[in-house]
Amino acid sequence: MGMRVLVEYEKCCGAGQCVMVAPKVFDQRDDGIVVLLDETPPPEQYKAVQEAVTVCPGAALRLEESA
Ligand code: SF4
């Protein structure tokens, strides 16, 4: 069982908190909108991604279980 990161790009306000807490999973475009670097991150990244989901001010990020 793995985890998949889902991004609702239209909700991203470009604040960059996700990049600060999980730089291996998220980057930002020049205009600030999030870039998903790793849609199915390894387990050692789950905590950081969960943190990013929590701190994202636009509620643009979700984690779901994937087979
Ligand atoms: S924390 Fe949320 S709003 Fe900010 S850049 Fe990341 S996805 Fe976008």
Image (tube, rainbow, N blue to C red):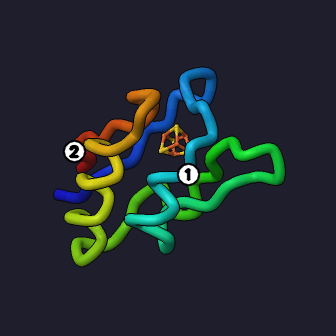
Q: Comparing marks 2 and 1, which lies closer to the viewer? A: 1
Where is 26 relative to 56, above or below? below
Viewer-proximal residue among 37 and 34? 34
N-terminal label among 2 and 1: 1
Q: Residue at x 71, y 46 (%)?
A: 32
What residue is shown with label 2? 65
Is 66 on the left or on the right of 21, as rendered?
Answer: left
Viewer-proximal residue among 35 and 57? 57
Q: Position of residue 48 (x, y in %)?
A: 29, 65
User: CB of residue at label 1: within 8 Å of ligand 1?
Assistant: yes
Q: Residues within 10 Å of mark 2 (few under 14, many from 20)?
A: few
Viewer-proximal residue among 19 and 8? 19
Q: Amino acid at mark 2?
A: Glu
Q: Quadrant of the N terminus?
A: bottom left
Mark 2 and mark 1: Cα distance apart in space: 24 Å
Q: Residue at x 21, y 44 (%)?
A: 65
Q: Residue at x 32, y 73 (%)?
A: 42
The quarter of the displayed image where residue 44 is located: bottom left
Label 2, secondary structure: give it.
strand
Q: What number is the disc on residue 16?
A: 1
Q: Amino acid at mark 1?
A: Gly
Q: What number is the disc on residue 61?
A: none
Is 24 on the left or on the right of 46, as rendered?
Answer: right
